Every structure is written in C-alpha cells, then in structure tokens.
Image (cartoon, rainbow, N blue to C red):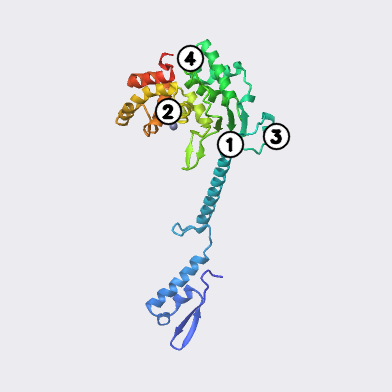
Amino acid sequence: MPRDSVPVILHYKDSAFTVYSLEEYNALPDSLKGNEAQQYYIDSVYRSMEYVAAPAVASDDENTPDTSFFFLALFVFIVFIIWSIYRAVQQFIAEQKAHASVPSIETEESIQQEPAASYLVYKGASLRFSNEEIDKVCRKYNFYYQKLQTDQQLLFTDRVKQFIRSKDFYICAAKGYKEMPILISASAIQITFGLKDFLLPHFANIVIHPEEYFAYDPFRVLVGNVQGQSISLSWKHFLHDYQHPHDGKNVGLHEMAHALQVQYLFSKAKRSNSFKEDYAHYDRVDDVVLNAERSSSNRLFDDNALRNSNEFWATAVELFFEKPSELCAQYPDLYKSMRLVLNQDPAAM
Ligand SMILES: [Zn+2]
C-alpha cells in the first residue's frame, strides 16, 4: 500500500468524490481541486501523512529529523543519570560508614570473607609492620625519607609505626596495599618531624579513596580533605605527587597541613600550645606574601592557595618541602617563619 494512501473527500457543486493519494489529487482538473487555500491544505495533509508513515531508520535525508536517534540518546542519557546517582549514593553510604567513630574490629581474613563490603577497615593497632618493611617502602617512595641521616630514619620509621597504631584505615576499594597506611602515615610524620607531638590525636580515621571522590553539601569532587575526625585522600593523586617531589604539589602534605591547623589551632581554640605560639610568627607574614602573590605575574602559589589563608598555609607547606630553595629565595620571611613553626629546614637537607 502506498504510503500516502489516505482518502480525502472532495466536494464539487452537488457531488462529492474521493481521492486516495496526492498523485490522484494532482491529476484532477483544476476546477475540481478547489481554491488555492484548499489545494495547499490537501497538499499539506498528504505530506504530513507521508512524514508520519515514513520508516524510522535509514533515512538519507539529512534534513529529516531522526526521531529514533533522539529517543536512543535520551534513553542512554537517562541510564547514565541513574547510574551516576546510584554510584554517588553508594559512595556516600561508604563514606558515612567510614566516618562512623566506633567501627567494629575486623581482621584481614574477615574482610576477605565479605566481598560485598565496598570498603576495607584496618585497625592500625592490628597492622604490625616491621621497621624493615616501613623502611623499605619509605626508601622507595618518600623523597624526604631518602635524604634523612640513618639515625633520623630510625626515628622516622618508629614514628610511622606509632602513627599507624593510633589510627583506623578505611580503604574504599576492593583491595588494600600496605603502602597505603605506611606512606600516608609517613607524610604525617614528615610534616611533624620537628615537633614533639606528632600523632595528630584529633584524627582517628584515615580514609583512602582509589581516586577522586565526591563530597556533599556542596557537591564537589575532591582529591583530599579533612573533616570531623577523618583525613581523606585520593591514593592515585597521593602517589603521583610523591613521584614528582619537586613540582610544589603534594596532596598528602597539603591535607596534613590542614590537619595540623585543626589539631593545634581550631579544635581547642582557647587552649594555648607551643605550635600556636610559633604559628603566630607565620601569621604575621603570610598576608604580605598572599597579597604579593595575588598581584604577581610570576606566581609560586596556585589559584587555590590564594582563595583564603587556610589554603595558603597548606600550599605553603607543599612548597616548603618540595621547593624550599625557591620559597626561601622569594619569600625569606615566610620561609623563616615556617622553619620556626615546623622546627625543620628542608632547604638545608
Ligand atoms: Zn586545602
């Protein structure tokens, strides 16, 4: 049956007759076709019928809208949105569980028996790494450790061990590696190596994500953050940054710098401590450098650092360890004050 086989009844004087296609209609004498408006109307009716009845696929006419493609794209889009929401919710639930303050004790064995869990829990107290294991991992990945004298390395590994014991590690992945607790703890020990107190006891949890992760309220994608009793990091970015030790970027040190602020400046705001007293020296010079950087065309600090004084501090710590000579040369007062706060001097190592 032709696509345009649609009956249209035409009236002429007292009689009426029917045509079934545009072809038939066009073949009529002009006197039967009616006036111009009627002709246009009948033409449109047949053409629209033709369009509706046209096959949905394999049209060569580029101007014909391909409705099937539109619905397919819409379907794919909806599936993608549902999948994204599902993934975000799963991650959110995992994170909420990870942030719960009193998790039950789980051994490595019991974790393996529960493959459905979306994160692994390692109580630091149950992770019994030897000094040799810690030394081996730090020697391979931690540029700061590599430069320490032997006796300092012994002190460093001992501190890493104590730090690990004092934390719970939540790994939001199917598999964990011993490098995760060792190296993340090592970055905490690196920043606190000149300090008497190095355990950051305010933080009970270290949360390790395999890569970038979501945070809520407001919704954002993060590579590291410090919230409540947890220090969270993207393992991918953490490792990458330790493999590029002189580019001034180190998310591990950045988050540990925030953790130091929370531990000594914010959590017990009214109570005095020696870190807070030393930080006052830094606090006197940071604004000058922050403003100088904001108007500089050749910046040492990135955009994030210039957002506020907390980000500025965390980035200054990254530069202090990764570009100590540049920081010291460009902003000697800032460097001096940080040397005082952290009681160490990476430029001299
Ligand atoms: Zn930050």
Q: Which is more foreground, mark 1 or mark 2?
A: 1
Taking the spot 41% from the left edge, 31% from the top edge, the residue there is 310
Q: Earlier in the sequence, mark 2 or mark 4?
A: 4
**Residue 228's x, y, as percent?**
51, 34
Viewer-side residue, 103 vs 130: 103
Q: Determine if the C-beta at disc 1 is less than 8 A from ligand 1.
A: no
Q: Which residue is mark 3?
A: 113
From the viewer's perspective, is the residue at label 4 or at label 1 nearer?
1
- Compare marks 4 and 3 and give the one earlier in the sequence: 3
Please determine whether, in this image, residue 31 is positioned above or below residue 219.
Answer: below
Q: Name the mark on residue 100.
A: 1
Label 4 – label 3 distance at C-alpha = 41 Å
> In the depicted view, which residue is nearer to us: 208 or 169?
169
To which residue does mark 2 refer? Answer: 314
Evaluate if marks 1 and 2 touch, with contact meaning CB atoms under 8 Å apart.
Answer: no
Amino acid, disc 1: Ala
